[in-house]
Structure formats: structure tokens, C-alpha cells
Amino acid sequence: MDEGVACVKYILITCNLLVWILGLGVLSVGIWIRSDPDFWVYQDNLPLSNYYNACYVVMAVGVLLLVLGFMGCCAAAIDSPCMLLTYFIAMFDFLIMECAVAGLVWKVADGDQLQHHLAVSIEEKLDTVSYDSHAKTIHGSHASSP
């Protein structure tokens, strides 16, 4: 085998192994966020109605990365032209879908308005938590005095 072809093969295997590990990490984070009851305390304080759906999208992206990484590693390892062609077609299709989703997000969700809304919501919640904590401290000190 030519040295250049071998180098490209090993680079492709390494990159796809990294994609597979990234997919495993993304899937793990999605499952963790969805199943951790302590994390939902933070979600309840924000007006995000589609939070469950976002968790499922994160998990789906993780599974997709796992499948693509595995498929790319296998295609490069066994030097199958058909599998490599299928892999590159799938990667091209997903690149087109990513661009379409990015365009929709850019068009539909105004980034500055969303950032401002989240910042205001977080500040209001922090003020409420700070006030509640201060009130409990004052109430606790009066309760222990004679």
C-alpha cells in the first residue's frame, strides 16, 4: 500500500474514532440531563417549554455521531469502496441538514432577543433566591434569640 494512502486511512480512522468518542459523550450528557432530578430544578426556573424535546435531540445527535463514527472507522479499516461511498454520502447529507437547521435557527430565533430574555430570567431568579435566602437567615436568627 502506498504511504500516502496508508496515512489518509489512519487519519480517517483516528478522526472517526474521535467522532465516535464525541458521540458517546454527547449521548451520555443527554441521558444525564434527562434523568438527573437535581438538574430539573434549574429548568423549572426558566421559561423553556420544549426542554424535554431538546434533551431528546441531544441524545439523537449523540446516537447519530456514534453511528457515523463507527461507520467511518469500519469503512476505512476494511477499505470497502462501497462502504466509503455510503459514508461520504451520509456525511454530505448531514452537512446539508446541519446548514439548513443553522439557517432556520438563525432566521426563526433572534439570538440577541433570546440572550436578553434568558439573562433577565436568570437575574430575576437569582434575586428571588437571594431574597429567600436572606429572609430565611433573618427568620432563623430571630427564632433562636430569647
Image: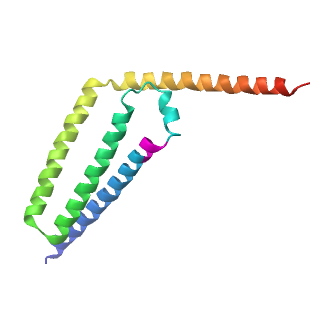
Residue drawn at the location 18% of the way across and 40% of the way down: 97
Rendered position, 57 above or below 115: below
Residue at x 15% of width, y 57% of height: 87
Query: Which secondary structure type mostly characterizes the magenta part of the structure?
Result: helix
Along the line of sight, the residue nearer the viewer: 57 or 102: 57
In the image, residue 36 sits, relative to residue 72, either above or below, namely above
Which quadrant of the figure has residue 103? top left
Q: How many marks?
A: 0
Horizontal arrangement in the rendering, residue 24 relative to residue 123 (left or right): left
Residue 40 in picture, x, y percent from top left: 49, 35
Question: What residue is drawn where x is 83% and y is 25%?
Answer: 143
Q: What segment is highlighted magenta in the picture?
A: 32-36
User: Left of 101 or right of it: where is 44?
Assistant: right
Q: Residue at x 58, y 26 (%)?
A: 126
Residue 32 in the image: state x and y as whole percent. 44, 47
Residue at the far bottom: name it: 1
Q: Is residue 63 above or below residue 74?
A: above
Asked if residue 47 is positioned above or below residue 3 in the image, the reply reads: above
**Which quadrant holds residue 50?**
top left
Q: Nearer the viewer, residue 6 or 27?
A: 27
**Residue 37 image position (x, y, % from top left):** 50, 40
Q: Tell me if residue 88 is in the magenta stretch.
A: no
Q: Position of residue 77 (x, y in %)?
A: 19, 70
The quadrant of the picture occupied by the N terminus is: bottom left
